[in-house]
Amino acid sequence: MTLDDQSTFDPVAATIADAVAAPGAKRSRRANFAGSVLPPLAVGLIILGVWYFISLVVLDPKRRFLLQPPHEVWNVGFADWDNLSTMLEGMWSSTKVAFWGLLIAILLGFLLAIVMSQAKVVERAIFPYAVVLQAIPILAIVPLIGFWFGYGFSSRVLVCVIIALFPIVVNTLFGLLSADQGMHDLFTLHKANRITRLRRLMFPAALPAVFAGLRISAGLSVIGAIVGDFFFGQGEVGIGQLLKRYANRLEGEQLFASVILSSALGVSVFLFFGWLSGRLIGKWATDSRGK
Amino acid sequence: MSQSPLSFRNVSMTFPDGTKALSDVSLDVGKGEFVTIVGPSGCGKSTLLKIASGLLEATSGEISVDRDRIGYVFQDATLLPWRTVRRNVELLAELHGYDKERRIQLAEDAIDLVGLRGFENHYPRSLSGGMRMRASLARTLTLKPPVFLFDEPFGAVDEITRERLNEETLRLFEQERFAGLFITHSISEAVYLSTKVHVMSSRPGRLVASFDVPFEYPRKPDLRFDARFAELCGQVSFALRGAHS
């Protein structure tokens, strides 16, 4: 073998390229941090400014209850433990509903997508109904669910499942079918069976799309939990019922505080799945963090 | 002739949409032979390899080949992006159910053979096109295939990388002496690597000329500047022009 002279060339060059690239990457990370944190921070301050302006300057003091200034929202909504604890309890109730809804949607969604990925005819048979389910306004279906299944925990979970299912099915199916033909040929050539193909090729290939779907569905499941609670208006008090109550009583500070809390819940599940996807597939996927 | 590891007898292929891809192709690749087919793009060269490997079935004709451990290097490296180089190289041994110890040993040897030592734990996305192709070659080598099919494997890399990969392919061939069937549209690549060059016409693909390449192995890079090399390239080029019109 006289490989040495030829083969060492490429690796060495590439190693040097790596070494050169690394410190540059570190430097630009700091620049990235400034670039990615400062602009949204600036917009946040502008929003606060406009909020203050409307609340204190535009609105007549008698009508200020329509939009209380930010520090009032803080004082009444977050700094007052009585109010905050009520909201946190509501949040906890809604979080449980969203969690179970999402979990069931994930299991059901994966199952449907896997079945659909195995035969075109099954995909054609099921897909239209997934679209129909997605197209029904959730507001129209919530009262119906209440009629049929009552207003308890399981009905609320069902609302979450319905709203969160579609993105999981679509993204997982898309992901399972995304492995390119060459790779399938390779598996065919070496006589891989259906299970091997699914496990070693289609599942891993699906992961980036699966995570994209999960991020969307996690947020939707939180919305489902709140919407269900809002419309059922009975049973264990979740954040939906609180929103309704505060709105009826014109308690603007609490209303704002619960809106902020519920969006914080949605944002945190979104971030959680982004983090998880970075941990699991960040090493190899070309764009796993999403934008 | 039936003892050749790979032989085609009067193979024709018409696709369901009526496209005639191959017409009456007969061809043998003996052990220790490196046969190359050059032809214009879209002339059915790749179809021939797909038929050889069993990915496609010929409309008529006979193919004799042992498909158990067939080596097939695709146009793209087709590495699994979620596997490191080492795990990618292990894939075929895994699909064939080799035990772990043997798999690791075969992968280690193949990685050394293609010069990817030091890059075993890299993911494909951080490799250059040439290095991905090496990993793809290494993956195929783990099976020690008696028949090696190459489907324009170096078409997408730059000229310098291509020449270097040609050297490596030669060395692999000189060492393993498989029966090689190589597809390309580069004439100098064809002549440089092969014991025999066939020229294929387009639509439907037919073999219109054959050239024996007289140069001894091991071949050195400066063969490319030899007058006889240039002359043979000229003849192949002439035949290819004829096939094109």
Image (spheres, grey):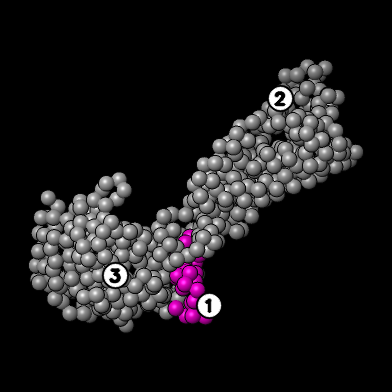
Callout in the foreground (2, 3): 3
Q: Which residues are magenta?
A: B79-106
Callout in the foreground (1, 3): 3
Q: Position of residue B153 (x, y in %)?
A: 31, 63
Name the residue carrying label 2: A53
Instruction: Name which residue type carries label 3.
Output: Ser
Q: What residue is drawn where x is 27% and y is 46%?
A: B18
Q: What residue is drawn where x is 39% and y is 73%?
A: B69
Q: Position of residue A58 (x, y in %)?
A: 72, 19
| Label 1: element kind | helix
Q: Is residue B42 visible?
A: no
Find the distance from the CA under tag 1 to the CA under tag 2: 69 Å
Q: Position of residue B57 (x, y in %)?
A: 33, 59
Assess disc 3: are there few (<14), some (14-19) or many (≥20) residues with their C-alpha within 10 Å of its C-alpha.
some
Instruction: Locate residue A29: give its quadrant.
Output: bottom right
Name the residue carrying label 3: B64
Q: Chain of mark 1?
A: B
